[in-house]
Image (spheres, grey):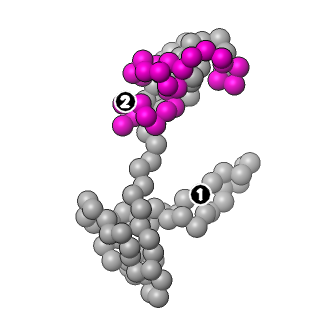
Amino acid sequence: MVEELSGVTHAQRIKVRRGEDKIQTNTVVLTFDSPKPPSRNHAGYLTLDVRLYVPLPMRCYKCQRYGHGKDRCKKPAAVCVRCGKGGHVQRDCSADPRCVNCRGDHAASSKTCPKFL
């Protein structure tokens, strides 16, 4: 497939998890040889729309900080993604949102966090 697409150096199909199974989707992440990808690409008789894909940064689901996963977290106890306090989980939280990363008034998982950007 990569050989047919102009400027593409790598292609990887997105998979989703359904229970224990990983199922392939129709979405493919393409890596281009230039920093600005085209808006369209051609593969045989197909014209493919190209959109920028920015993966989510690694965020620990224990301490809610960026840059490591829960398996490498050094914090002794988990904190709520919504308020940043320990002792409960998000679904039981009624506190005002407070990000542990920037102290802003949003959850640590928010894409509006300046530390996320």
The residue positioned 64% from the left and 23% from the top of the image is: 90
Image quarter hosting the C terminus = top left
* Residue 36 point in image, percent of width and height: 27, 62
Q: Is the magenta stretch mostly helix, strand or loop?
A: loop
Q: Quadrant of residue 5?
A: bottom left
Which region is colored magenta? 90-117
Kind of residue sitting beneath label 1: Lys
Q: Which of 114 and 67 is in front in this view?
A: 114
Number of numbered labels in the structure image: 2
**Residue 9 visible in the snapshot:** no
Q: Nearer the viewer, residue 96 or 116?
A: 96
Mark 2 or 1 closer to N-term? 1
* Residue 111 point in image, percent of width and height: 46, 37
Residue at the disc numbered 2: 115
SS of the residue at dot 1? strand
**Residue 34 visible in the snapshot:** yes
Image quarter hosting the N terminus = bottom left
SS of the residue at dot 2? loop
Q: In which quarter of the image is residue 89?
A: top right
Left or right relative to 21: residue 27: left
Q: Is residue 65 above or below residue 51?
A: above
The residue positioned 44% from the left and 47% from the top of the image is: 55
Residue at the disc numbered 1: 15
Residue farthest along the right direction in this orientation: 19
Q: Is residue 95 magenta?
A: yes
* Residue 56 point in image, percent of width and height: 46, 43
For disc 1, the neighbor class at 10 Å (few under 14, some 14 to 19, many from 20) is: some
Q: Are marks 2 and 1 in contact (CB under 8 Å)?
A: no
